[in-house]
Image (cartoon, grey):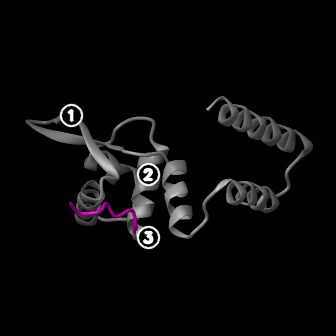
Amino acid sequence: MRKKSFDLTKGEESMMEIFWDADNPLTIMEVSRLTDEFNDSYIHRLVKSLEKKEMLKVVGLQKSGKQYARQFFPTMTREEYGAIVMGNLGIQGEKALAQVAVAMVKRMDNDTQKDRAMLIRELESIVEELKRG
């Protein structure tokens, strides 16, 4: 069995951003309307590649004139993909998770006391969830 490849090209990552930002499944025509970064032919190739890599899946059909267009949806969240990328970089384990959280907080620009308080509440929520198993 072939191992899934989550190594995405810059173009594939840009395409995934479009799908992650959408609240619903998208057809290739809808993607084409949402971006001027890629031409239609390249969008087709990127979606086909992302489907092969199991980053996108077909979740339905939408009537378009006399034809039907496939609707695609991500198989994982942006955060789940980020976790895979970090794992591929060797960033794993509980200590690494804490170090990444600290590094991300340090990179925050102009964070206010309110932003910091929200972040602390979110991190506390994550800790409680982990404790529950």
The majority secondary structure of the magenta stretch comes to: loop
Tell me which corner region of the image, top left, top right, bottom left or bottom right, holds residue 40: bottom left
Residue 11's place in the image compared with 120, above or below, is below
Q: Crowdedness of circle 3 by 10 Å Cα count: few (<14), some, many (20+)?
A: few
Residue at image x 87%, y 39%? 114
Identity of the amino acid at label 1? Answer: Gln
Dot 3: element? helix
Residue 27 in percent (x, y) is at 27, 44
Instruction: Of the two numbered discs 3 and 1 on the same chain, state the one appearing first in sequence.
Output: 3
Q: In the image, which disc is placed on residue 76?
A: none
Residue 5's place in the image compared with 128, above or below, is below
Identity of the amino acid at label 3? Answer: Lys
Q: CA distance from mark 3 to mark 1?
A: 28 Å
Q: In the image, which disc is placed on residue 62?
A: 1
Q: Crowdedness of circle 1 by 10 Å Cα count: few (<14), some, many (20+)?
A: few
Name the residue carrying label 2.
Answer: 18
Residue at image x 20%, y 42%? 70
Tell me which corner region of the image, top left, top right, bottom left or bottom right, holds residue 98: bottom right
Q: Is residue 95 magenta?
A: no
The residue nearer to you, when weighing 120 against 87, is: 87
Magenta span of residues: 1-8
Q: CA distance from mark 3 to mark 2?
A: 13 Å
Q: In the image, which disc is placed on residue 10?
A: 3
The residue nearer to you, when weighing 98 against 65, is: 98
